[in-house]
Amino acid sequence: MKADALISELKRKFSISTDRELASRLGMTAIQIGNWKRRKKALTPRQVANAIEKASHAAVTKAHRSMIRPIVEFFPLDATESRAGVKYELFPTTVDGKPSYQQLRNALADANGIYIFYDTRGRAIYAGKAKQQSLWREMKSAFNRARDTQTVYRVRHPTSGRKFVAAHEKPRQPLRTQLKLNDLAAYVSAYEVDPGMINDLEALLVRGFANDLLNARMERFAGSRPRKKGGA
């Protein structure tokens, strides 16, 4: 096989145009690609085998480096009412707000992956994934979602329009109150994750910290999920 013909076909297959790009894909240098192109003899089976081996190593290295990419870690939340006043944003995202808030929102809106909410002590309280939706939409949904597992004892006090009455005059009973993450969470971390790893990484977090997290569902690893009857 002629080297220049192989190089042309690889560039077409990878939709790239330069030797440098091809060299990066194959785990080679641009000089090595140039030497191949100047080679008049056909490539030997050993050279082709070595090229395949290098390309395989390069692909694995690239996958490892891009598998998990931190977007933000232990970012302090600033719960803000949405325009309709029904839900809460994780932080202000209006045009006249902080530019860094808007830039972070855009980064989360363009990525999928894993996120973790923390309480005021920095202890993880909820881990979730964003695979079908963006991190921003999934995080905001979880931030406003009510869960039976998130309850504490609270006393309901009048907030406005009423005169204060001391507790010894009007006792109020502490009652179990269902909370949302926006009542508990103080910080958040978010990571862009390779789509093929999102489910298993979420399962690892939930299963590894099952006694600390407020997740109601115990996730499974892909390899340990029960197979359907009649399946392969």
Image: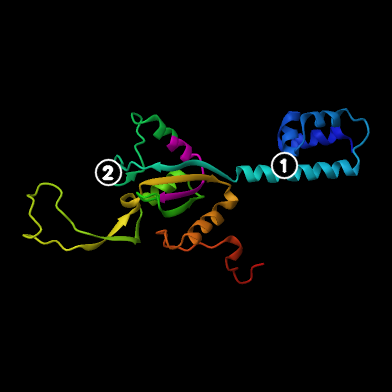
Image disc number at residue 85: 2
* Residue pictured at 45% horizontal, 36% vertical: 106
Apparent side of residue 66 relative to residue 108 in the rendered image (left or right) = right
**SS type, badge 1:** helix
How many angstroms separate mark 1 from mark 2 (CA)? Answer: 50 Å
Q: Is residue 110 magenta?
A: yes
Please, which residue is most extreme toward the front here? Answer: 121
Q: In this view, does 4 lie above or below 139?
A: above
Locate residue 187, reporting x and y percent: 39, 46
Label 1 sits on residue: 58
Locate residue 129, reporting x and y percent: 49, 52
**Which image quarter: residue 39?**
top right
Q: Is residue 134 visible?
A: no
**Which image quarter: residue 21?**
top right
Apparent side of residue 122 relative to residue 21 in the rendered image (left or right) = left
Magenta part of the chain: 104-117
* Residue pictured at 20% horizontal, 62% vertical: 174
Q: How crowded is mark 1: few (under 14 residues within 10 Å), some or many (20 or more)?
A: some
Q: How crowded is mark 2: few (under 14 residues within 10 Å), some or many (20 or more)?
A: few
* Residue pictured at 79% horizontal, 36% vertical: 9
Locate residue 25, reporting x and y percent: 72, 37
